[in-house]
Image (spheres, rainbow, N blue to C red):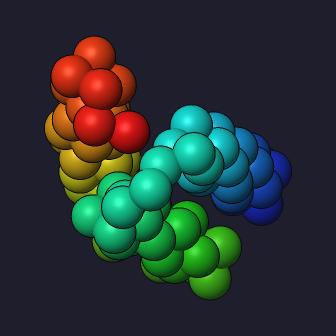
Amino acid sequence: MKSRLRWISIGFALLLTLALSCETAGAADKTKVDHATKQVQNGARQIGHGRVVPGFKEMFVGIGHTIVEGAKFSGQNVKEFFTGKK
């Protein structure tokens, strides 16, 4: 049962990482978003290596940073698009 739960959490973490990284694929200067996405990936790796609690903590903190930085970046891209700077 414990092994099954571990594989389910690893699968969830990998799917979440993939979804978050695909959403920001077209960004031009997205270093902060990439850093936050890597934090999610590092958390998922920790979960895969058996360190579940610190892995989930880092993964969810990374998800929060990814959402914040992604929203900032998207807002800036929309602003640049409508002001004609691109």
The residue at the far front in this view is 84
Q: Position of residue 71 (x, y in %)?
A: 26, 32
Residue 40 as seen in the image, left or right of residue 22: left
Quarter where residue 76 is shown? top left
Q: Is residue 56 above or below residue 64?
A: below
Residue 11 as seen in the image, left or right of residue 45: right
Residue drawn at 62 percent across, 82 percent down: 49
Residue 60 seen by the camera:
no
The residue at the far top in this view is 82
Residue 22 seen by the camera:
yes
Residue drawn at 36 percent across, 61 percent down: 29
Q: Is residue 50 above or below residue 80?
A: below
Residue drawn at 56 percent across, 37 percent down: 23
Q: Position of residue 66 (x, y in %)?
A: 33, 48
Residue drawn at 47 percent across, 49 percent down: 27
Q: Is residue 23 above or below residue 59?
A: above
Q: Count all numbered tags in the image, as a single digit.
A: 0
Quarter of the picture holding the C terminus: top left
Q: Position of residue 44 (x, y in %)?
A: 55, 66
Residue 47 as seen in the image, left or right of residue 76: right
In the image shown, does 10 or 35 lie closer to the viewer?
Answer: 35
In the image shown, does 78 or 71 lie closer to the viewer?
Answer: 78
